[in-house]
Amino acid sequence: MPTFADTTFTDPARIRNFCIIAHIDHGKSTLADRMLQLTGVVEERAMRAQYLDRMDIERERGITIKAQNVRLPWTVTDADGSSTDYVLHLIDTPGHVDFTYEVSRALEACEGAVLLVDAAQGIEAQTLANLYLAMENDLTIIPVLNKIDLPAADPDRYAAEIAHIIGCEADDVLRVSGKTGAGVGALLDKVIDEIPAPTGDADAPARAMIFDSVYDTYRGVVTYVRVVDGRVVPREKVLMMSTGATHELLEVGIVSPEPKPSKGLGVGEVGYLITGVKDVRQSKVGDTVTTARNGAEQALTGYREPRPMVYSGLYPVDGSDYPVLREALEKLQLNDAALTFEPETSVALGFGFRCGFLGLLHMEITRERLEREFDLDLISTAPNVVYRVIMEDGAEITVTNPSDWPAGKAKHIYEPIVKMTIIAPSEFVGTIMELCQARRGELGGMDYLSETRVELRYTLPMAEIIFDFFDALKSRTRGYASLDYEEAGEQEADLVKVDILLQGEAVDAFSAIVHRDGAYTYGNKMATKLKELIPRQQYEVPIQAAIGSKIIARENIRAIRKDVLAKCYGGDISRKRKLLEKQKEGKKRMKTIGRVDVPQEAFVAALSTDAGGDKSKGK
Ligand SMILES: Nc1nc2c(ncn2[C@@H]2O[C@H](COP(=O)(O)OP(=O)(O)OP(=O)(O)O)[C@@H](O)[C@H]2O)c(=O)[nH]1
């Protein structure tokens, strides 16, 4: 078993901190597994696939959600036969766009990155996005082609592509297989050779950057840090620089691959801190930890509060589950600083919560965890982005829920936009452009990566991609396109709120903010759909779509006219009239109650088809 990795206060010259950046499914976790095995930190029989992906959902979906880190010992034998021991810290980064902030913090904890590319697929949009992030952080990049064992692998072709993008020689691109382990030892040697050792001032006040923070049922929050200056030791009082909160360090340790308490962490070292706090929001990714006494004055980098970009209402199908949902959300929040929620009521759906997410994937994962881990059945309303509305009188309103849309006259309306990169075979350029234009996209540029593959850059309103953009792109390109995006500020737009009215009354759950040009289509679509879903009632039910007081679409659900005269043969006209009057009275009463008898399933069905397919992935 390794011993060198257990020692503390390692000489920074013998430390290498690196991460692996890759597009989803290019084999990052599998390669990390091989590294754990090869360096001996996990014994052969204890090995299980994707050791570092601890959450069940991660393993099932095969995606990495939370960054994990691990310390690996590696010995290099020099030409003269002497050997030197090193400590490698592998920082596993989440690959998805929703977690870009976590990726960028994890990158900051490293001096180098292994750029991993599937040798049968080539560079994809996320590879590029993460590569650019790594370059911005001045990391040393080691380009590697993975899965060379695959019959479909074409390493020569993709080595040329990588060389073209990062400006190296095609021969410099290493070739490995995470599956067979081929080339992995050579890769670790190269990490030590090429990635610079960390530097920092051992005598300065301690400064450690938080790059991950997870909640553990038994131990409270476990905070992962990289020490930049000074050292952190157990029982010391530390200060979180963004919040000003102080905590005592109950435990300091390293992960290899299980947590091991240590005497402390010094310059360049990566490990964990336990302070006994119970909520990750008290120990936030991106924050700087220093000592409470004689601490550092200057935090490491600008800390950024995680900001929800997409909102959706979550309602329990069974109203009595409301308290369970609240408790479940509170529990998830302990481990997810980016999740926000507040109570909301809907006429159609009852009591629920308005939840804020970093993006669509974050939303889907949260929902799935709520349903799976807390056994809840949920309805979610169509997701929406955050709008900024400036009124005629200068008042500024932030709208996270269509029902908060101001009634008065707006002077300016701003919507969030994203910069998107799409990589696809060149034959699909036409259809991709068509799709992006239909979603109000603006082409920013186009480059050929090779003769047959193109990179397209677009600016698009975020609202246009949160529904089903990804699915539409995949089906138009037979799955060959990949995309990545980053938020890129906001733009002014002509947006309106479309209400859906049942018998003259707006149904809050169906209100949506859409571009004026798309309002008619949205209104029509919803009205037609509801007409199909709502059963006929005793009276006629008009379904209308409206912008303010202007009706833009209308459908009718015809009444089932109960024939009250059926048993009244011939005879007295006044009796007939009386019966008809009575029937009308009954209808009026229903109308004055103002509620159409709509089964909840109809709402659920109407919402789920619009919610961008998140239902289809359900449980
Ligand atoms: N043939 C072959 N398959 C591989 C290799 N490496 C990974 N795979 C397979 O590729 C798939 C994706 O691998 P993962 O390691 O889960 O990919 P990942 O990049 O970690 O995915 P995310 O965590 O979602 O970003 C899995 O089915 C692996 O078994 C390899 O070297 N050769």
Image: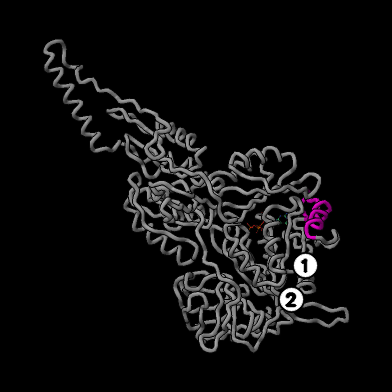
Q: Is residue 198 visible?
A: yes
- Farthest top residue? 570
* Horizontal arrangement in the rendering, residue 270 relative to residue 310 (left or right): right
> Which secondary structure, mark 1?
helix
Q: Which residue is mark 2?
A: 74
Residue at 39% in and 38% down: 500
Looking at the image, residue 241 lies above or below residue 420: below
Magenta-colored segment: predominant secondary structure: helix
Position in image of residue 153 (x %, y %): 78, 51
Classed neighbour count for the residue bearing mark 1: other residues with Cα under 10 Å, few (<14), some (14–19), many (≥20):
some
Q: Which residues are magenta?
A: 148-166
Q: Which residue is mark 1?
A: 187
Which residue is at the front of the view, 57 or 350?
350
Position in image of residue 611 (x %, y %): 48, 44
Classed neighbour count for the residue bearing mark 2: other residues with Cα under 10 Å, few (<14), some (14–19), many (≥20):
many
Position in image of residue 530 (x %, y %): 40, 34
Q: The disc labelled 1 sits on which kind of residue?
A: Leu
Quadrant of the rendered image holding ligand 1: bottom right
Q: Is residue 30 visible?
A: no
Residue at 79% in and 77% down: 76
Q: Quadrant of the N terminus?
A: bottom right
Residue at 53% in and 56% down: 362
Which residue is at the front of the view, 519 or 500?
519
Colouring scheme applied when the structure was drawn: one colour
Q: Does the segment drawn in magenta span residue 482?
A: no
* Horizontal arrangement in the rendering, residue 34 relative to residue 608 (left or right): right
